[in-house]
Each structure stands twice: as structure tokens, then as C-alpha cells.
Image: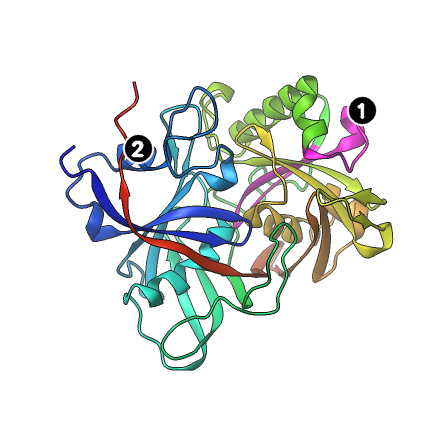
Amino acid sequence: MGATLVRAAFWRGGTSKGLFFRDEDLAPFDDRDEVFQRALGSPDRYGRQLDGMGGGISSLSKVVVVHAPRHPDADLSYTFGQVAVDRALVDYSSNCGNLTSAVAPYAVREGLLHLSDGPAVVRLHNTNTDKIVHVSLEVRDGDVPSEGSLWLPGVDAPGAPLDVRFIDPGASRCTHLLPSGATRDVLDGVEVSLVDAVSPLVVVRAHDLGRTNPLSPDEIDRDSELTARLEDLRRRAAVLAGLAGDPEHAPLAAPKIGLLGPASDYETLEGRTVKAGDYDLAIRMMSMGRAHRAVPVTSALALAVTAQLPGSLAHDLVGGRDRLRLGTPSGVVEVGARVEREGDGLVARHASLWRTARELMRGEVRLGDPRA
């Protein structure tokens, strides 16, 4: 493949980490997917990515490529890639809301974007979904500081607040906000709600699968019957959404599937008790076949939209509200969305939440040997 060193930066965005590349630095390579896999250490038969920068789980096996703007309403464009841990695959079927929060700070630090000191709004174009994202941030001495007082569930350090707002998030991959035309459907005898806002999401009530929510990620991962059932429903939903012609060819990253439940007391991964009155809706998400230890941002925002759609499973549990507090394994995440009636239908105007981001390192990543 020629050169074995590639300029890159390693960033945490929200509750994810990933490698960031400039588009021009990948120009010498014919196969970018192979670059990403070699950099992160995939595929790895042991599921740990020890020979690369990945961390062995979906939230730590990601890449972002930043481009010059490819949209008239954007300052920058970026492409997200979900690198499979145990197989030779990079999935571009969805965006990553967590790493989206790091795109603007990365671009400023790399000199790709020059902003005056003070409050600023950076307009990002995500090429995976062809959607616009507005990130509000503070510029100080020509940089975006990472130090601040905002704590995120799942991140053991505070950071500077970043307001991440997805504009017109409906129909990111499908043709409609409601891909099937309904706020609820029945898949293999189970009621589900399928929505495409920020990214495609399908949710099912935990008790309809004979489980009580909230479960811990480890409890979910140990329950092979449950994980197999969720994956089967997810693949069926992909067909219903028009993302695949049959379940076997469903994308790995879209739609994501989650277990819903009413608010009840539970213990976070750090051992802290969350009371039922401290949040509105319990959510446990699957990502690339494993239980997520927090919640994917795109799924949280899609759920915020879903909760405002009368007849959906989420709306039945919490009713329509502009702000929604989600009980996740790492703690409570607050998200917001604005949904309006337009003609005979509903339109999602925006969905938003707060994130933090921090550069962990920059330099060159040495590519490992190609894997068979």
C-alpha cells in the first residue's frame, strides 16, 4: 500500500473515540477502508484490536474524514466510518453523533477552519446522510478549548460544552421520517416503532420480549436469546425501512435497535443509583451486536423525535415533550427535538443535545500489516 505512516489525530467526542483524517492525506491510498482497518487493528479474531488504535467495542472503533465543504450551507463536510471489530468491513450507513461534536474543534486545531474569538456556530455537512449539523462553541485564542464544567454520563472528566443541533433530521437514509408510514408496526409478532431521524432507529418494549428494563449491558450481552431476537428484529426492520432487500443484507449500523421501558430505579455502571423520578424513559441500545454502555447520540436524538409522534411506543410511555431525559447504563442524558405538523404529516425541524470533545493525540498512525 505504499506509505505506512498516515497523519491523523485521535479524539474523544462525547462517549466515543475515533481517528480523524484529513481527506487529502488519504489521497495516496487506493483502498481507504483497508487504511482504516489497519489503523484500528481490524479484523481481530480476539475482538480486542490490540494491534491497532481501536478499543474492541463499537464506540471505540470509528473513523472520521474531514473534507472541504461539499454543500452550499456548510463550512465543512465530513464522512463517518464504523469499523467492524471482528470482520473486514467499514460501514458508512449511519452518522455518529458523538464524533460529530469533535469535527469542528478538530478542524480549528488543524487549521482547516479559522474562527474569531467568542461564540461561534459551525455548519457541518455529514456526507453519510447528506444532512446539516450546527455546532455552537466558544473560541479562545484561535482555538476551541476542551476544558470546562460540563459532565457527560460515561465520561469521567468535565469539558467545554458543545451544543450539537441536527437540522431537518428526518429521512436521513430512508425516504420518510416514518419509513413504513406508520408510528408502529408489527414484526414477527412484536410491536415496534421505526423512525428515521438523524439515523434510522427501531425500538421495542422490553416487556414484549419477556424482559424488564432497565437491564445492564452485561446482562444483555449474556442473554444470547435476547440478543439474537433483537438482531433478527433489527434486520427485519432494515427491510421494512428499505435499507435492505432481505434480512441477510441489512447494514450493520442501520437501523440501530433499542429496548424501551418506563422509568424505574436502577444502578449505573459506576454504581450510582438513579431514581425513577430523575428521568423519563429507560433505553438500552444495541450497537454492532453488543449492548451499548451509554447511548449512541444518533439513537438518543431519534428517540427524542419518536417520543413526539402520537401512536409511537415512546409516545405511549412519556407523551410528547420537547425535552426528554433518557436513563442509560451510564446515567441520564437529556435530549431535545422540535416536531411540527405540516399538512397531513409531521416534520422534525431539529434535534439537539450537549456534548464535550477533547483531542487525545495528534501525529502519525503506523499502519499494521493487512489482515487476511
Q: Residue at x 54, y 54 (%)?
A: 14
Question: How far apart are labels 1 and 2 at the CA level?
Answer: 41 Å
Give the crowd class for mark 2: few <14, some 14-19, many >=20 residues within 10 Å.
Answer: many
In this image, 348 relative to 24: left or right?
right
- Does the magenta segment cover residue 40? no
Q: Earlier in the sequence, mark 1 or mark 2?
A: 2
Residue 95 image label: none
Relative image position of residue 236 (x, y in whole percent)? 57, 25
Q: Amino acid at mark 2?
A: Arg
Q: Secondary structure at mark 2?
A: helix
Relative image position of residue 304 (x, y in whole percent)? 66, 53
Quadrant in which residue 84 is drawn: top left
Relative image position of residue 318 (x, y in whole percent)? 79, 51
Q: Which residues are magenta?
A: 192-217
Residue 38 image label: 2
Q: Please tell me whether residue 65 is drawn above or below residue 61 in the rendered image.
A: below
State the colouring used for the structure image.
rainbow
Q: Amino acid at mark 1?
A: Gly
Quadrant in which residue 228 is drawn: top right
> Circle 1 sits on which residue?
210
Q: Is residue 127 visible?
A: no
Q: Residue at x 42, y 30 (%)?
A: 49
Quadrant in which residue 370 is drawn: top left
Q: Please tell me whether residue 63 is drawn above or below residue 136 in the rendered image.
A: above
